[in-house]
Image: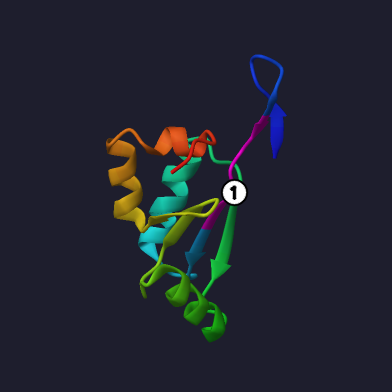
Amino acid sequence: MEGRGAAGGEVTVPTVTMYTTEVCPYCIRAERFLKAKGVGDITKIRVDLDPGLRRAMMERTGRRSVPQIYVDDYHVGGYEDLVELDHAGELEPLLAGGAG
C-alpha cells in the first residue's frame, strides 16, 4: 500500500507478515497490538495447516514457536519481542518504513 507523504512524495508502507496458528493467544495479542499501532494488513501464514510451512518458518527464523513476525525482511520475533521493540522506541519508525 502506498500513499502520499506530507511533501508529496511516495510513502511505502512496509509489509507485515506473521507466522501463526488458529489457536494461539500470543498471535492474537500480536495482531491486536499491531492493529493498535495502525497496521491495517497483516499477511498471516498458518503453520498449523501445513507442516512444510512450519519447516519453512523454522528455517527462516531459527525458532519453533508462534507468532514469528516480520516487517518487510526484518525479523521482529515473537509477541514479547514486538512489545520490547515498541518500548525501545524502535517499532513505530520500523512500521513507518524506516530500516530495522
The number of numbered discs placed on residues in the rendered structure image is 1
Residue drawn at x 50%, y 38% is: 95
Residue drawn at x 71%, y 29% is: 3
For this orientation, the residue located farthest to the bottom is 51
Residue 49 drawn above or below residue 17: below
Q: Quadrant of the C terminus?
A: top left
Picture coordinates of residue 75, whole percent (x, y):
43, 56
Residue 68 drawn above or below residue 16: below
For this orientation, the residue located farthest to the front is 99
In this rendering, would 96 be left or right of 61?
Answer: right
Q: Which residue has dot 1 on it?
A: 15
Residue drawn at x 50%, y 59% is: 18
Q: Quadrant of the N terminus?
A: top right
Residue 97, image quadrant: top right
Which span is picked out in magenta? 11-17
Kindly state the secondary structure of the residue where label 1 is placed: loop
Indicate whether residue 100 is drawn in magenta. Answer: no
Residue 93, image quadrant: top left
Picture coordinates of residue 5, whole percent (x, y):
65, 21
The one nearer the camera, 50 or 98, is 98
